[in-house]
Amino acid sequence: MLYKATLVTVTLSLLVVASPVEHGPGVKIALGERSTFSRADDTFDHEKAILDNIKTQIKYQRNLRNLLANTGSLPEGWEIKDFLTIPPSSEKRAVGTEALADYRDVEWMGPITIGTPNQLFSIDFDTGSSDLWVPSSSCTSSTCVNKKKYDASKSSTSSQKNGTFTIGYGDNSTVSGPIYTDTVTVAGLTATDQYFSPVTTLSSSFASDPIDGILGLAYPSLSHFRGQTPFFNTLISQKKVTAGEFGFTLGSVGSVLYLGGTDTSKYTGSIEYHGVNTSTGFWQASGAKCAVGSTTTSSGFNTIIDSGTTLMYAPPNAVSAFYAAIPGSHLYDSERGYYSYPCNSPPDVGFNWGGKTWNITHANFNHGQTASGSGQCIGALVVASKNLGLGNNTWLLGDSFMKNIYTTFSFDKNSVGFATLKV
Ligand SMILES: *[C@@H]1O[C@H](CO)[C@@H](O)[C@H](O)[C@H]1NC(C)=O
Ligand SMILES: *[C@@H]1O[C@H](CO)[C@@H](O)[C@H](O)[C@H]1NC(C)=O
Ligand SMILES: *[C@@H]1O[C@H](CO)[C@@H](O)[C@H](O)[C@H]1NC(C)=O
Ligand SMILES: *[C@@H]1O[C@H](CO)[C@@H](O)[C@H](O)[C@H]1NC(C)=O
Ligand SMILES: *[C@@H]1O[C@H](CO)[C@@H](O)[C@H](O)[C@H]1NC(C)=O
């Protein structure tokens, strides 16, 4: 399969620039902030990062299983793992050991309501998956204690469907539950008969999380609910939004999700759009280049833009080439592929897809000192575990990337777009 080559062609032909004025009005959802891995004392929380790494692996393996079930094939080099090896000790230590107040930020969460009358939830809006789930009133385990729970019996618009929703493999520490449809509203935009799962089993990895559930914003081909549309696609098909586009502004103040167009109050200049290959199901742009200062460390790779992932993950060779361009950098955790660099000489990191170079600020690259006073800081680019199953030419760009720019996701154009944040 000429995956790489064809993707590059598509990207070049779809590189278009749009004027900010041509988009219709949408709605804004104020978001709380995503945690970083820096504690209040500026040190790196290794256990918390490992837990997030594991959650990312589980999420991508679930996505790949759904993609295969929905489309019958996977992109070249991508693979489903029979079993993820999850070290139980790491997970145990990572859960609930720190009060949230010890961190600067909480999640990029915003409110949604489900049912009639409304039941309110705090949701993580995730461009790296496509399903909606919230805890169910039937979840009685300790992991659900501090969560808001959906009670189908109290909603006049709820309807149970056949089948079971599940995330996780090989063990029973999964997220799973029945499948329902109900009315779902975000910032006044209402999707009726929306498929979702009120989960009755909630993995301990979500217990200490401030969110109740997740709302996926990627393509329908990643959805567990085969043949059904994810929330935003339901809004499009039910004609509740004027434009099939949404955008994120993620920052330390005023994080916003904009649904139904582009938020012209949040960016300046034009948006640089790049076509995505919709057959992967992800918001995946190809033909990317990464540079440290004036040194290009990798080029011609695919990038998945994922608001539900904190860091940036790349194949092992790409990560070692990257840190080789940063004097004084060291491998910090050889098992997980975290690197440190000298805090007082941070790298100038930029990504380029054939247009402008989109830079990562020093603050967004830094995830905390290895130890108080060590002078070495953990970098936001980490080795992608083989367990992700994304092969050796696909990078995940999470919040460490998205915080630097206005990022927009267009189903109308089948493109992701980048623009300069208004300061
Ligand atoms: C998109 O990706 C699929 C899966 O890797 C590949 O088979 C196909 O050729 C790609 N399509 C284009 C237009 O690049
Ligand atoms: C990347 O994976 C392909 C198979 O998917 C393999 O042929 C190639 O040698 C790999 N490249 C590297 C650098 O590991
Ligand atoms: C759901 O299951 C019931 C009972 O097994 C069956 O009669 C019905 O056709 C199924 N509905 C769908 C949509 O599969
Ligand atoms: C998971 O639970 C099911 C049903 O409770 C049980 O049959 C199965 O053996 C369990 N699997 C593991 C790995 O514990
Ligand atoms: C990124 O940094 C380079 C080098 O400082 C600069 O030339 C470029 O304009 C920056 N990109 C953006 C989008 O601001």
Image: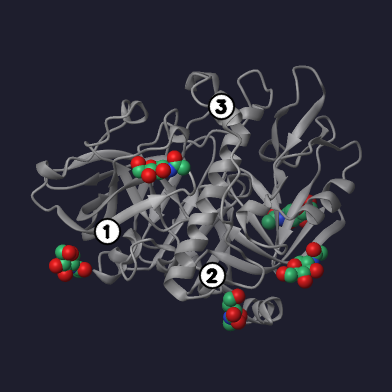
How crowded is the residue under tag 3: few (<14 C-alpha within 10 Å), some, or many (20+)? many
The C terminus sits in image quarter: top right
Residue 291 position in % (x across, y down) = 80, 56
Residue 213 position in % (x across, y down) = 36, 42
**Secondary structure category for the residue under label 3:** helix
Instruction: Residue at 22% x, 47% y: name it.
Output: 114
Q: Which amino acid, by three-letter code, is at mark 3?
A: Ala
Confirm whether residue 93 shows in the render. yes
The disc, 2 or 1, on the residue closer to the chain's N-terminal end is 1
* Residue 118 placement, left or right of 303: left
Instruction: Residue at 74% x, 54% y: name it.
Output: 350
Residue furthest toward the right?
Answer: 327
User: In whole angstroms, how far apart are the C-alphas of marks 3 and 2?
Assistant: 32 Å
Q: Which label sits on residue 94? A: 3
How crowded is the residue under tag 1: few (<14 C-alpha within 10 Å), some, or many (20+)? few
Q: Is residue 377 above or below residue 238?
A: above
Q: Nearer the viewer, mark 2 or mark 1?
A: 1
Q: Quadrant of residue 310?
A: top right
Q: Which residue is mark 1?
A: 163
Residue 94 position in % (x across, y down) = 56, 27
Instruction: Residue at 23% x, 69% y: name it.
Output: 238
Ligand 5 in which quarter:
bottom right
Q: Which amino acid, by three-letter code, is at mark 1?
A: Gly
Label 1 residue near ligand 3, CB within 8 Å: yes
Instruction: Work out whether residue 92 or residue 416 is closer to the camera in this orientation and state it.
Output: 92
